[in-house]
Amino acid sequence: MINCYKLHEKNNILYFSISKFENYPNIIHAFSSKRTGISKLPFEALNLGYCQKDSNENVEINRKLFLNALSLSNYKLITPIQTHSDIFYEISNNSTTNNIKADALYTTETGLILSIQTADCLPVILYDHKNQLIGIAHIGWKGLLNQLIIKMIKSLCEKYSIKPKNLIIGIGPAIQQCCYQIKEDVLELFKKEFPFTEDCVKYENSKIYFDLLHMLLLQLWEIRASKNNVFWIKLCTYCNKKYFFSYRREGPTGRLMTVICKIK
């Protein structure tokens, strides 16, 4: 479903949310924008990822500003080391949360802020009301090719006796097909794995444009996620320079952050 999102401003911090998730008062979630904050160019204020060209102090202050705007400053932020893998990891209050190498996280516990960082890739959140389970995933083309979301959902469904159709799934801003060019070798990798790959491709002036969002949706439909429970923000991070960082547009750049937390 498109146009199911809101743009919020609180404490001078701008962020996006998906309306459906706001129906659950015990869940707080957000997709950050790059507006405000204290980082300087080229990171343009609200950079939430550590990198060589921005100071750790700036990032720490920006994260505090972001979490304060969400009323999450008293909760524990979990930030995995992302490697474009198919690895997902369960988080608990007893987990060692330093140096977690994973591209997706989930938990049934309260007070843990699950987060991922993006600058064009797809940020995905999910919620199962029955088991009070939340999850989050960072998915680029490698995550799609390696079927991260399929593997994670199948594992959760088996472990918690969940039906995929009952999961509430949200997809945040990412680079859209209009701006995402790939090479023939990457396309061939997808064709070998997914018979519906051509549905995600547009050919224009001898260039190949790939639709990451549509590929993700087709994977979700394949495992019987409900079209009534999947919501997405179809804003292109490359096109919308005002709000988003984009690695494809800028090269080395800042990072957006997506968070989801169960507060009670």
Image (tube, rainbow, N blue to C red):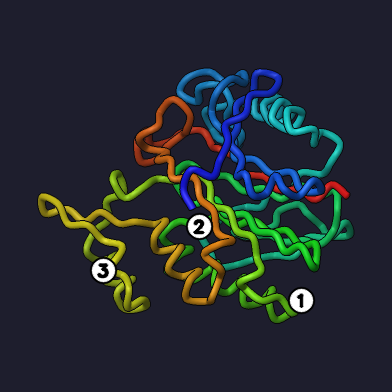
Please report contact status of discs 3 and 2: CB closer than 8 Å, yes or no.
no
Please state if 21 lies on the left or on the right of 249 as rendered: right
The answer to whether the residues at label 2 and label 1 have Cβ atoms under 8 Å apart is no
**Front label number (2 vs 1):** 1
- Residue lying at 55% horizontally and 50% vertically, measured from the top left: 123
For badge 1, the amino acid type reads Tyr
| For residue 60, side relative to residue 204 (left or right) | right
**Badge 3: residue crowd in 10 Å (few <14, some 14–19, many ≥20):** some
Q: Position of residue 114 (x, y in %)?
A: 72, 50
Pointer 3 residue: 198
State the mark number for residue 57. Answer: none
Q: Residue at x 63, y 24 (%)?
A: 9
Looking at marks 3 and 1 on the same chain, the residue that comes earlier in the sequence is marked by 1
Residue 260 image position (x, y, % from top left): 70, 48
Distance in Å between CA atoms under marks 3 and 2: 20 Å
Which SS class for mark 2? Answer: strand
CA distance separating discs 3 and 1: 34 Å
Three-letter residue code for mark 3: Glu
Q: Which residue is mark 2?
A: 139
Left or right: residue 9 compared with residue 114: left
Q: Position of residue 27 (x, y in %)?
A: 76, 48
**Mark 2 or mark 1, earlier in chain:** 2
Looking at the rendered structure, the secondary structure element under dot 1 is: helix
Which residue is at 77% across, 28% downward? 68
User: Which of 94/150 is in front?
Assistant: 150
Quarter of the image for residue 77 reads top right
Q: Are marks 3 and 1 in contact (CB under 8 Å)?
A: no
Label 2 sits on what residue type? Ile
Residue 256 coordinates in the image, percent (x, y): 55, 37
Is residue 263 toward the left or the right of residue 13 in the image?
right
Residue under pointer 1: 160
Taking the view exactly as shown, the residue that stands out farthest to the left is: 205
